[in-house]
Image: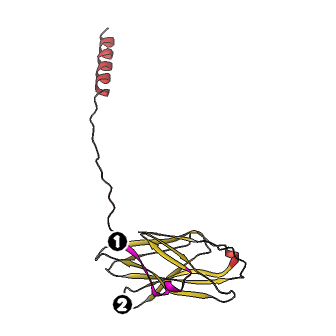
Amino acid sequence: MKFLTLLLTSMLIVVASAQMYTYMYIQGNITFGASKLIWEEGPGASDLQSFNINGMTVSLTLNLSGYGAPVNFTDVLYLTNEYNGAVNNIYINVTEAVGGADFTEAKMHIWTNATGSWQYLDYVNLETLDDYYTDSMAEANDGWLMTFEIDAVDDSLSDPDFTIAVRY
């Protein structure tokens, strides 16, 4: 009998304890502020068939006049750090690739002016899905220059598209 009473008492304590809750809350707010990095149109953008910057998105059309020799589109696009001391770890990757069989070369070259003069960093291959480049940009007004090198196999291309994502 004592055991049964002890068991019932224990069960009542467990039930009463299990029904007591303490709540904690998180109140958040999402705002959109100025971007640390901005796109800027380079003087070479005027040589493109079309070029547009709309906030965080750049749309451009690289027009080839022939094939069999690389065409370089220089001084097209800049990625600039607007804020002093804001270190930006940047990851650039190809999220939609052009058809590899259609091109001998399809690259976006990346240059930096961190030392005061333009120095070559690397490229992303527009023919390779998920090809990437990553680095950091730390000083105010540092920038990266994006140039394009395209060499088509022939002129029977059906306007291949590519997409490059820039994450920071």
Magenta residues, start to end: 30-49
Mark 1: which secondary structure? loop
The spot of residue 102 in percent (x, y) is 69, 77
Q: Earlier in the sequence, mark 2 or mark 1?
A: 1
- The kind of residue tagged 1 is Lys
- From the viewer's perspective, tell me whether residue 112 is left or right of residue 8: right
- The residue that mark 2 highlights is 116
Figure quadrant of residue 23: top left
- Magenta stretch contains residue 36: yes
Specify the label residue 103 is tagged with: none
Which quadrant would the C terminus be assigned to in this image? bottom left
- The residue that mark 1 highlights is 36
Q: What number of labels is visible?
A: 2
Mark 2: which secondary structure? loop
Residue depicted at 39% across the width and 74% down the height: 38
The spot of residue 2 in percent (x, y) is 29, 11
Question: In front: 158, or 152?
Answer: 158
The spot of residue 19 in percent (x, y) is 31, 26
The spot of residue 156 in percent (x, y) is 73, 78
Q: Residues within 10 Å of mark 2 (few under 14, many from 20)?
A: few
Compute the Cα span from label 2 to label 1: 20 Å
User: Marks 2 and 1: which is nearer the front?
Assistant: 1
- Magenta stretch contains residue 10: no
Figure quadrant of residue 136: bottom left
Figure quadrant of residue 71: bottom right
Question: In front: 142, or 57?
Answer: 57
- The kind of residue tagged 2 is Gly
Color encoding of the figure:
secondary structure
